[in-house]
Amino acid sequence: MSQARNPAVSETGDPLLLTPGPLTTSKAVKQAMVHDWGSRDATFIAINRAVMEELPKIIHGEADFVTVPMQGSGTFAVEAMLTTFVPRGSKILVLINGAYGQRAKRILEIAGREPVIHETAEDTPPDLTEVEKLLVADPAIGHVFAVHCETTSGIRNPIEAIAGLVKRHGRRLLIDSMSAFGALPLDSRETYFDAVAASSNKCIQGVPGLGFVIARKSALAETKGNATTLVLDLHDQHAVFERTGQYRFTPPIHVIVAFHQALQEFWAEGGVSGRGERYSDNARILIEGMEELGFRTLLPAARQAPIIITFHMPQDKNFVFQRFYDALKDSGYVIYPGKLTVADSFRIGCIGALDAQNMRSFVATVSDVLAQMGVGLKSAA
């Protein structure tokens, strides 16, 4: 079968990544990286400026927000956001229902901030009544941190309700929207926050290597001197951009140029609404197909983001996850193992350069693999 007709390979013949990022990218995004630029090259500087100016538009915040890019993975951006916006010795309420909330807690502890923790199970959103009690009880809490879509389970946290609560109590909200930015709506005109962190290799469909924080200008201006590291100082990074238009340290040039191409494709698809619609369609096809085969999702529909779907591990004695994973990989599909404490599970992503045909073909392949393993389809769960 030719690559052009095989739904189990990308445009360039690579396996399809049904993961939450890095993910399958378009051929044009890959091709954007085949040229070299110097970091002070005028063409590259213009491309980088265009990227920085485009990102606040995604949250309808071009008047009040500015993009501060940060070399490295998404966690670099989250750490930069937390350690720049939260002053040393200050308290911050961290809402945890997965690995990325836990990671934020660890970042804050290492940096000498004082996290106050509200933790729920990985399949359960924050209890806003309890969150409000914590804010009322401790006026020293100045900030709240929340994860938009926690990819440990795929849960969509109620970020709009959290933001409303935080604002009513006069606190400042910081958002990790790593796996949601560009696919789930986040309108800064209606949802109040000081900063949101994301990265190049998620729903915008670029490649790994660039994190970024979209920061409220007035809030960023208050952060001078807060940072505990030179490299992750967002205030200084922004100030240097304002003066020179350049990075303080070597930027991931090829990643940024590819991200510029990915942003053009994002807008051509219809921005958040267009991309979110395709991902939602992918998720619907995947869930319906896998349920028809006997699999059960971890989350109810009301909590499920169309980013990554967690499925319970089948109880059939013939089902061995490593065999299942390897057979899918041999067929051109890469999925994710689970990382839950609440259930034995695995995860399948719906994002990236994937469409309805890819998802239907994946489900058909799963059916074939189960048959090869001797796992009864309807008894798989």
Image: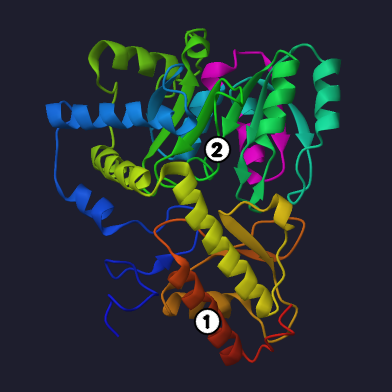
Q: Earlier in the sequence, mark 2 or mark 1?
A: 2
In-front residue for pair 102/346: 346
Label 2 to label 1: alpha-carbon separation:
32 Å
Regarding mark 1 in the picture, which secondary structure is present there? helix
Residue 104 sits inside the magenta stretch = yes
Left or right position of 272 against 302: left
The residue pinned by badge 1 equals 364
Q: Magenta part of the protein: which range?
A: 83-107
Question: Image quadrant of residue 173?
Answer: top right
Quarter of the image with the N terminus in it: bottom left
| Coloring scheme used | rainbow
Query: Does residue 19 sit above or below 180 in this rendering?
Result: below
Residue 6 sits inside the magenta stretch = no
- Give the amino acid at mark 2: Ser
Neighbour class for label 2 at 10 Å: few (<14), some, many (≥20)? many
Regarding mark 2 in the picture, which secondary structure is present there? loop
Residue 171 at x, y = what percent? Answer: 69, 16
Residue shown at 74%/24% (left/top)?
165
Residue shown at 14%/31% (left/top)?
43
Q: Please give the count of numbered marks on the rendered protein.
A: 2
Query: Does residue 213 sit above or below 375 in this rendering?
Result: above
Residue 233 at x, y = what percent? Answer: 44, 19
Q: Can residue 349 be seen?
A: no
> Which dot marks residue 316?
none
Residue 185 at x, y = what percent? Answer: 55, 39
> Which dot marks residue 177?
2
